[in-house]
Image (cartoon, rainbow, N blue to C red):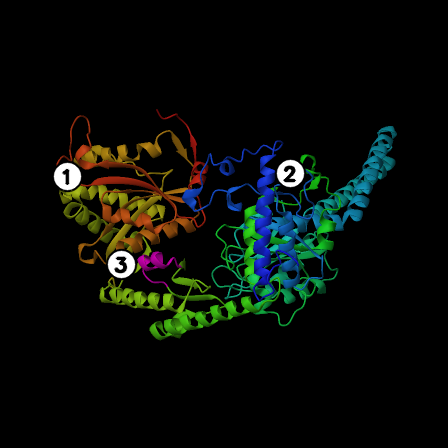
Amino acid sequence: MVKNKIPDDPASHINKHTHSFKVLLHRVKRLARHKLGYPVSLLSHLGIISNKVFGIKQGSLANILLNNVGDPFKDSETSLMEVKKHERMLIRILEKFYGLAKDDARGYVTTGGTEGNFAGIWWSKRYLINNAMSTLLQTDDAVKLQMKEEQDLLVALAKIPNNDYFNRATQLQKILDIRNAIAANKSIVQQLLTPTIFFTKDHTHYSVPKVAEILHLNIRPIQANPDGSMNLDNFKKELILNLVAYPCSPVIVVCNIGTTITGTIDDIPGVKRIVEAMQPKPNFTIHMDGALTGFVLPVLKPFGNIKNYFAELGVNTLAFSAHKYLGLSQPCGIILSRKFFFDKAFEKAERSVEYVGNIIDSTVTGSRSGLNVLMFYNALCILGLDKNINKLRKMVTENLENAKYLYAQLVRMMGPEHVEVPYNFNVIFAKPSLALAKKYQLMLRGETATICVLSNVTKELIDQFINDLQLDREMTMSTTKPEYTICTLTVDHQKSAIDLFTKSFCDSEPITKHLGIKYNDYQGFAKEVVHKAVKDGMSVVAVDQHNHVIACVIAEDIANPFIPVLTQYPKLKPIFSLLDQLSEPFLAGKKFIKGKIAHIWIAIVSAEFRGKGLSTAIDMACATICMRKGYDFAYAEFTNDISEKITHHYKVYELCNSINYNEFTDEGQSPFKGLNGKAAAYIIGIKPGIEIDSLPNCYSVIAKVS
């Protein structure tokens, strides 16, 4: 009688792989008791550090380090607390899923899409260079011989008498010819070592141009079609131009299998046809950035019935994220390639790690989470992909039906002209309020919002969202909005802007009213500010149908600030002292680089138009103008909490300083005593993708601030 037999039922493959995890846990615990060599303390496994707060049980596979180092197809000889066997099984499942022949897939589990793209493009560069190795070596040898010939010609030239003009001229021509030949051959070597990468501008994942920069590749962005896919006419044009400029440069084409916003899938067969039709045909490879949709490519079948998604499409590498469609709780993904491609890419590799068993490290990170590998493998088995694609196909079908359901609900509410389903899971519609977008974590771009309909998006959740959206629209429509146009502040708006400026601050601004500032005290200051703003060309106004300014935002380059002459408007001195103290932590000790930080320092809205969103609209319009002029950040002071709320419309912002009016002193006086509220200063990232860490690039330190 056979003991411990796995039951033979429809779920037996799940029972089998679950049982393998129990066996693995027993083995790993035994290994942990004898671990001496590697610099890992196992504090979580020992219970010294508890992970219970995260729901991780003591003594579980999730509570002990599982470290896969280097190529998963080479086990470590002594670093045995690894799960490369499961990583190989995972790759075998995907190998069959994408139609590759048995044992024809190579790759490894990555930390996500960025690392997958990095590995795919890095491997592509190695592959293309190794493919051209014989030409490289021959050309390099030719350069060496030509350089020796050049030296011999120079020696011979030195022996020719200075008055032997004919022979000296002949010799000099030979030297020029050999130098030109050397330069030409060096150019060939450089081109062979520097592939050109093509990708769709503004729609390919941001990691691709970053990786291209790190790997020193030539970059050729391609225009997009309206749906975000690669424009093949522009690709063909750019490819021809590149071949004329760099005839020996190999080519890497990055094709998208589902862009983030539109879900666009590039025409990979079309890309392949264009490259192969070139005369001469360049040495090339195609990388697929699968992101979300790459995982379900064999279910969606955008290119028809294809057996092998690598060979038939001319693709050598594919990366996708496992935390997207598969929904794993940890960011991770995979890079896959064909075996011949991988072997060629690393045939000259000498990057072995001796202390873990002479493993060739073909990975970007080296050490990788074994737990992510197990979770990834577990997910594939639960979906039954080790057997067939039936369960996955059913899930995808349900996703697509729910996307159609959401589309129909939105069309009924907004009309078909305001809703679209460009590809598969993504539904795009007119942007709702920011509060609703935050509640449902919508993807916003411009005036549109995107919902990605995956398995978590049920019809019940869609109905809940539609009800909230209806209420949101009713509230928005019930608020009367003024008719206005936002434009750059010009000389035509000067008088109207100065009048609004003076009236608003004297009648409505708390600190100005507290000081008893009158129109004639303030008007001279308003004139100077507006005149400079017109010259700077960075400020905006909102004008009504009669071209009368109803709102204004003043901006300048922080490297070229307005400097008030206090003797001309002495009653404003406490206000400027307040602003000086407020800005000191950020401004002191720095010399700012022009064109990097915009100073947005005055925002005013006519009294009858307040509370209608106009302040936010012109603030963001001003920031947009500054961003288009090349500015990365905006520095802004706020003297009331209503204006301050604009900061929350940006992903990157940081409070620099705040001062309570009651606590402010100037030369021993408290000019705002009894006034509630505060002034605050913020630095805001206005350039898409900018991080606060980039701020030091905008200035140089000229003095240490105590």
Q: Can the viewer see residue 662 in this picture?
A: yes
Which tag, 2 or 3, sits closer to the chain's start?
2
Which tag, 1 or 3, sits closer to the chain's start?
3
Q: Amino acid at mark 2?
A: Ser
Above or below — where is 474 with respect to 574? below
Q: Residue at x 40, y 62 (%)?
A: 449
Q: Nearer the viewer, mark 1 or mark 2?
A: 2
Which tag, 1 or 2, sits closer to the chain's start?
2
Q: Amino acid at mark 3?
A: Val
Q: Nearer the viewer, mark 1 or mark 3?
A: 1
* Residue named by callout 2: 79
Q: State the image quarter where residue 272 is shown.
A: bottom right
Please name whichever residue, 504 or 347, is drawn nearer the observer in this view of the structure: 347
Q: How much space separates mark 1 and mark 2, taking CA atoms?
A: 68 Å
Most extreme residue toward the front, as rendered?
1
Above or below — where is 43 with respect to 433? above
- Quick check: marks 2 and 3 in contact, CB under 8 Å? no
* Circle 3: element type: strand
The x, y position of residue 74, in whole percent, is 70, 45
Q: Residue at x 54, y 55 (%)?
A: 322
* Residue named by callout 1: 675
Above or below — where is 186 with respect to 11? above
Q: Quadrant of the C terminus?
A: top left
Q: Quadrant of the N terminus?
A: bottom right
Q: Amino acid at mark 1?
A: Leu
| Stretch in magenta | 431-442
* Residue named by callout 3: 543
Q: How much space separates mark 2 and mark 3, taking CA atoms?
A: 71 Å
Please name whichever residue, 264 or 628, is drawn nearer the observer in this view of the structure: 264
